[in-house]
Amino acid sequence: MSKINYLFKKFSPVHTAVIWEANQIIEDYAAQGYELTLRQLYYQFISRESFPDSWRDKVTGSKNNERSYKKLGNIISDARLAGLIDWEAITDRTRQLKSWSLYDNLPDFLRTMKWRFAYNVWKDQPVYIEVWVEKEALAQVIEKACRHLYVPHCSCKGYMSQSAMWRSAVRFQNRKEEGKEGHLIYLGDHDPSGMDMSRDIGDRQDLFLSGVTTHRIALNWDQVEQYAPPPNPTKVTDSRAQGYIDEYGLDCWELDALEPSVLDLLIQDKISSLIDPQLMAQAQAHGQYLEEELDRIIKEI
């Protein structure tokens, strides 16, 4: 934990309560093995109805607005500087340092490489699967859900670029030539653009003749009804807004508002429904054997 006091800050009782609640949410996420982005923290406040009543918008009566988000960001920033919130608990996934792996000697390199070894458990599977998520802020959640079976995953950052979409289609085509069915699992916001992105992915994959089947597993209407995430007003300036409003009404919902554990379960359940479990178990057992062999080799160096 990294609570470090850099500056003295005095907080009002209202702001102190916000800081206390933030730490409770951070602890909940840490217990599940997740870091938070500021946006995820914000949606947890909204879903738990934890913002003070004074933060309600005077026109809409909602606490879910850009002003509340900025207020929370300022309080969290000050609380971290004052040593009241862990610096490592909230992350910015858009500004990550890329560095090189360096080693002092060959044995150190081999011991490190052991943790990078992963047997190809998909070699004999009849399917090839990728998981895509609309937002980079949810990359860690998706990565954790995919890690167990080494499923390739991608943060689309909105609409996929033409280059990235074409390259993905080539990947699926190559797997198709190997006799594998292509499946693309997608998660996005329930708003005009977020819903349209599913259509766009399917249309362009068809255009590029990838042969992939796309599965939108979140955020869907049944999940909105089941989990009741906090709504946002639909942006009427979005060119796709009218069609969305005609079907769903004036509210929309963001994927970030769902608990990471819910997203994790949705992804793993969908992957499990597409694979051959017997072949996967055999492949995992062989992978375990190879890891033990690698341990033996390293010990003999």
Image: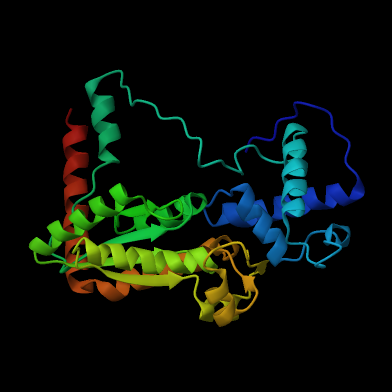
Answer left or right for 293 relative to 268.
left
Q: How many marks?
A: 0
Asked if residue 122 shows in the view, the reply is no
Answer left or right for 31 relative to 117.
right
Q: Quadrant of residue 298?
A: top left
Q: Quadrant of residue 203?
A: bottom left
Q: Nearer the viewer, residue 263 or 94?
A: 94
Name the residue rendered at 29%, 47% in the picture.
163
The extreme right residue here reads: 13
Asked if residue 279 shows in the view, the reply is yes
Q: Nearer the viewer, residue 290 or 93?
A: 93
Counting from the top left corner in percent of width and height, residue 118 is at: 23, 48
Q: Is residue 208 above or below residue 73?
A: below
Counting from the top left corner in percent of width and height, residue 259 is at: 57, 64
Counting from the top left corner in percent of width and height, residue 180 is at: 14, 66
Q: Is residue 120 above or below residue 116?
A: below
Answer left or right for 226 relative to 13.
left
Name the residue rendered at 9%, 66% in the picture.
179
Name the residue rendered at 40%, 67% in the picture.
198
